[in-house]
Image (spheres, rainbow, N blue to C red):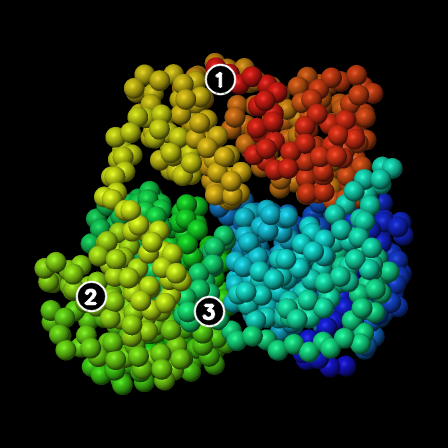
Amino acid sequence: MIDFRTALQDRVLVLDGAMGTMLQERGLLPGACPEEMNLQSPDVVAAVHKAYADVGADILVTNTFGGSRSKLAHYGLEGQVRDINARAVEIARKVAGSQRFVAASIGPTGRFLEPVGDAGFEEMVEIFGEQVRAFVEAGADLISMETFLDIRELRAAAIACRSFSSLPFIAQMTFDDGGRSVLGTPPEAAAVTLDALQADVIGSNCGLGIDGIFAVLERMRMVTNRPLIAQANAGLPVIVDGQTIFPGTPEEMTAFHERMIVAGVRVIGGCCGTTPKHIQAMRLALDGRDQRWSPPPRRSFLSSRTAVVALGGDAPCAIIGERINPTGKKAYSAELLEGKTAYIRREAQGQVEAGATLLDVNCGVPGVDEPAALERAVYAVCGVAAAPLVLDSSDPVALERGLQSADGKVLINSVSGEEKSLQAILPLATRYGAALIGLALDEQGIPETAEGRLAIARRIRDRAVAAGLPAEDLLIDCLTLTVSAEQKRAMETLRALRMVRDQLGLGTVLGVSNISFGLPQRAVLSSTFFAMAIEAGLTAAIINPREERMMDAWRSAMVLLNRDQRAEGYIACYAGATAAPQPAVLASAPIRERLAAAIIGGDAEGIVALVEVALAEGLTPLQVSNEGLLPGLEEVGRRFGDNRIFLPQVMLSSETMQAAFARLKQEMSGAQVPAPARILMATVEGDIHDIGKNIVCTLLENHGFDVIDLGKNVSAKKIVETALAQKVDAVGLSALMTTTLQQMEVTIAALRAAGIKVFTMVGGAVVTPDYATRIGADIYARDALEAVKKVKELFTHPAG
């Protein structure tokens, strides 16, 4: 049999359908571990594989979706990771034989990475690495990563695949009907990040029907030339006679086949609700079709968790904000030594508002623990700005920490033509899927001529490509030398830009402002040179975006070079423009506004000092909370609802709120104000997913509610007993899986039978408003912020 990568070029491959529901039909009990059946009931698992093989599936996916140490620990099986995962591959291989591929499944761990959660990046790589090593040992053909919600966790899984095997791998995220993951990542940002990690196939599974999945893949195709995968649900679930039904027919699942082939979808399969009948229909619908596809040319992009920036081609010259750099900035240097990030957050926000599309982050100060400082800085910037990052460090250890902390595909600044630099930096760029700036200098220094710089650029390109970095992801810094000392070399830099563009086909970058160092009215000279460099082919510029002359030159050049279509950006900036009013200085704003701003900005390290100021001004603890902190948190909710911020920012604001409350509790000396209500929260029996429920608990506590969190996989009996004993006012229930949905109805019925009169709230990925109404729940919440809003509507807040 040909290998998987070759088969992708030859035809569209059909992947199998749902595993969990098929196992339940064959005896898997609610709340039991599906992966344990690999050891206890291998014939049952094999029968599911055979059902899909018999109807034409090319790829059989192993029963290992929850086979990580973290997931198996819920069942006391964390010591059997190797046995469970290897046995699953063996079962599938016996059915697949030599005619079909065995794809080893990896699902999310159910944990958040730092700083939102408690999992470290290297820890996560090792957790996934345990599964990957077992797959390789057992003889899997490829790895399929499915249903991921967090792009950083999926990055860790992809790096584990590349670190511990040479197997091809598929990488998929799950998106909602608004086109984003739970943590705010759009399909484009996911695709850019996964493309850079050299995933063989990129796509989406679960969460949506075939029409929604196709819409996601169309957006991915705009930024990647990788083969795509579509693994849709059989429609969106509905409840009929107490049963969860997926209404999508086999014929409906094939409606987009023709368009998918044209779009480069090379693997088509099914997720929740799909059966062998659906897979058979997909197989038959492909037969007889022309399945040829040629990938489009590759383009270069950078990404953050929530945004994408194009580099080169017809894209505007990227603006790299240079202000997060301690050179000549005593206040920032002092903050780095103290381990603080206020300057970083302020500059990140300010530079993006001024027009920066990328943010350079440098923490190199003598005496600073640079790896720890760069990690903090990355977390701080990602918490307040959507712009992708440029990590600026000469320390490979610091760079690696920064790369692990980033949410997407970053740009490393930089590698030089020196052998020591090449050996240290190139492996980091390829391992973590980063783009790279190459400095046109080597052991002999900066060549005087453009030809000399071109030669170094060519050497860096050849080494980078040999190391596995696509040439499109390399930008050459032709180096800006100050004209006050070496006036004639400015034109050599411009000549070098043109030669790198025309002879090597590479993008370029310059630290533009260096040109005017030591001269008066620097912005006049720098902006003129900037315009000349853009015409010469500059791809990205490292500048201060708050320098208006520089931005004037950039906006004008983008119009004149036809990069700003219909002059839309230029008009938006200048049409009817008057002198911009100066923003209020936050330091002089009323303390209530400063408290709210700190919550909105997630300033956990500065909030306690602001609480101290508020108390010193005579505000009571309740006034600090209700007139300063809570308005900020309510604004966070509004921004979340409008998709202006996303869950990671909400959690940072929540962490800031907790720090403020901790200080207020000390002030009240134990004289606690009664909470507006006591709320019991639990994930229902059989369901071990609790991320969403945990977020709701945190936000309710921040709004002053007394929360009792029973955790996950909680029986109706325990919920009833606790509700009685603790005299709760409301019960919140969460479920993520269709197979545990009915436990919500069971639990609400048990509460009624026991005569417990409480408000009930339900939520989770599979819960719908109709289902909530049918089972008699008082509140349905689609997300954590809506849950808090609706609970507050039921109960009067203290002094509110």
Residue 264 coordinates in the image, percent (x, y):
64, 70
Label at residue 506: none
Q: Amino acid at mark 2?
A: Thr
536 or 335, nearer to the observer: 536
Above or below: residue 103 compared with residue 717:
below
Q: Amino acid at mark 1?
A: Gly
On the picture, is 673 further left or further right than 531? Answer: right
Q: Which residue is disc 2 drawn over?
A: 528
Tag 3 or tag 2, which sits nearer the N-term? Answer: 3
**Marks 2/3: CA distance?**
27 Å
Q: Amino acid at mark 3?
A: Ser
Residue 400 coordinates in the image, percent (x, y):
44, 62
Label at residue 800: 1
Q: Is residue 164 visible?
A: no
Residue 546 coordinates in the image, percent (x, y):
26, 51
Above or below: residue 345 compared with residue 85:
above
Q: Which residue is disc 3 drawn over?
A: 300
Q: Secondary structure at mark 1?
A: loop
Q: Is residue 753 visible?
A: yes
Tag 2 or tag 1, which sits nearer the N-term? Answer: 2
Q: Secondary structure at mark 3?
A: strand
Tag 1 or tag 3, which sits nearer the N-term? Answer: 3
Residue at 88%, 58% in the rendered image: 44
Residue at 66%, 26% in the rendered image: 680
Residue at 52%, 26% in the rendered image: 703
**Marks 1/2: CA distance?**
57 Å
668 or 214, nearer to the observer: 214
